[in-house]
């Protein structure tokens, strides 16, 4: 066997670096929706409109009424590792925003045709940046930001081939918005698909939002969860055993407002139903874990859907006790009683 010919080491061009990195962040249209709604919420939006064409493959347009991006910062918003959210390692340890890596817009722009339209409160007009050409020009818009993402994966056909039908991609996009909406009842959301208004969730109370997103039945068939144990606080609602489903699709867990998929929380919640659910029935719940940010690492994965707890036993016990207590006192937490 002859050794492979030696090839010189080269630095990859920025564009290619972004495209490679995009593979981690942008798996499908729903990943774009999640990142862009994160940004809207980080900007303090009170209204977020999500418009999709063909399951988001043709167009994802997210409009918010948040703080906006100043004209001179628009090109910077699209640069990798450029962020307004952290400036130091200590900021990272107490990060309260959804974003902080400064990667999403750069990643999305590298695999789509992206337009960024924004206006801050102090500006006389909005400005529109075309990511592909770099062209920046005045445009019309109220304070806030619109991000338009067209033809996702047009330059990366390998990725495009993995997309499912428009209906399936739309379902994933809608689920991404639902996860945000459950955590932020104070923000109004609308979702449009192919010109049709699909969902309209007005800003209101937590219970109202739960009813809007998961249905009145969820509210009637769940009990309030409210429990504090040391540095961990658990709130939300847990479905009564009768409300359990065949699939684990209504298990929403949040850590400091961020939707997560976490084995510790899932296991703890499940174990609270140990003696109540039989076979493969899956409990339903919406649980918020509030914890000192220093006790949880959110910088585990580019999508930030996984977190790592400094003391996972502490979280496990808190979740389990919280749900158990709620389920053993079902009457106290009925939805029609005033929340404490
Ligand atoms: P990150 O959210 O991690 O900072 P992004 O690539 O998602 O990185 O966004 C880069 C920057 O662009 C943000 O830090 C923010 O300053 C700005 N930005 C993005 N989207 C919005 C928005 N909808 N409203 C206001 N600013 C935004
Ligand atoms: Mg972001």
Image (spheres, rainbow, N blue to C red):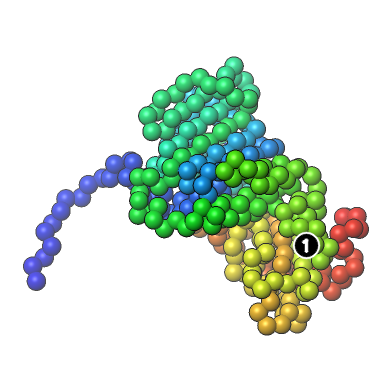
The reply to whether residue 154 is in sight is yes
Report the residue at 90% width, 68% height from top: 331
Describe residue 168's horizontal placement relative to residue 163 as left or right. Answer: right
Element on which disc 1 rests: helix
| Residue where numbered disc 1 is placed | 218
The correct choice, above or below, for 164 with respect to 82 in the image is below
Estimate the x, y position of residue 294 in percent, counting from the top left.
61, 54
Report the residue at 90% width, 58% height from top: 336
Describe residue 95's horizontal placement relative to residue 159 as left or right. Answer: right
Report the residue at 60% width, 40% height from top: 195
Q: Kindly indicate the quadrant of the structure image that contains residue 239.
A: bottom right
Describe residue 156's horizontal placement relative to residue 289 as left or right. Answer: left
Quick one: quadrant of the C terminus?
bottom right
Estimate the x, y position of residue 238 in percent, counting from the top left.
76, 66
Estimate the x, y position of residue 261 in percent, counting from the top left.
59, 63
Report the residue at 53% width, 49% height from top: 55
Residue sitting nearer the eye, 231 or 260: 260
The correct choice, above or below, for 167 with respect to 278 in the image is above
Residue sitting nearer the eye, 230 or 312: 312
């Amino acid at each position: 066997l002859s050794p492979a010919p030696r090839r010189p080491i080269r630095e990859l061009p920025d564009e290619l670096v972004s495209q490679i990195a995009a593979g981690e962040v942008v798996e499908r249209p729903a990943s774009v929706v999640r990142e862009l709604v994160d940004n809207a919420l980080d900007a303090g939006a009170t209204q977020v409109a999500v418009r999709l064409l063909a399951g988001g493959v043709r167009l994802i347009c997210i409009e918010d009424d948040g703080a906006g991006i100043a004209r001179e910062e628009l090109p910077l918003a699209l640069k990798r590792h450029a962020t307004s959210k952290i400036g130091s390692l200590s900021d990272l340890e107490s990060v309260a925003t959804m974003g902080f890596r400064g990667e999403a817009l750069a990643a999305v722009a590298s695999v789509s045709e992206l337009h960024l339209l924004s206006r801050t409160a102090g500006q006389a007009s909005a400005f529109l940046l075309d990511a592909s050409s770099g062209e920046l020009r005045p445009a019309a818009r109220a304070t806030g930001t619109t991000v338009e993402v067209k033809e996702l994966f047009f330059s990366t056909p390998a990725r495009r081939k993995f997309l499912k039908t428009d209906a399936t991609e739309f379902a994933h996009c809608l689920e991404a918005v639902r996860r945000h909406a459950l955590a932020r009842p104070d923000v109004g959301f609308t979702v449009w698909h192919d010109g049709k208004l699909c969902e309209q969730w007005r800003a209101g109370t937590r219970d109202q939002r739960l009813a809007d997103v998961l249905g009145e039945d969820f509210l009637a068939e769940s009990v309030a969860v409210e429990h504090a144990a040391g540095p961990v606080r658990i709130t939300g609602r847990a479905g009564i055993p009768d409300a359990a489903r065949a699939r684990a699709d209504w298990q929403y867990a949040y850590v400091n407002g961020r939707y997560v998929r976490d084995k510790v929380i899932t296991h703890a919640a499940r174990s609270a139903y140990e003696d109540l659910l039989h076979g493969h029935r899956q409990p339903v719940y919406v649980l918020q874990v509030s914890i000192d940010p220093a006790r949880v690492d959110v910088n585990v994965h580019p999508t930030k859907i996984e977190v790592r707890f400094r003391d996972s036993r502490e979280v496990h016990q808190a979740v389990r006790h919280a749900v158990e207590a709620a389920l053993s006192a079902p009457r106290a937490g009925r939805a029609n009683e005033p929340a404490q």
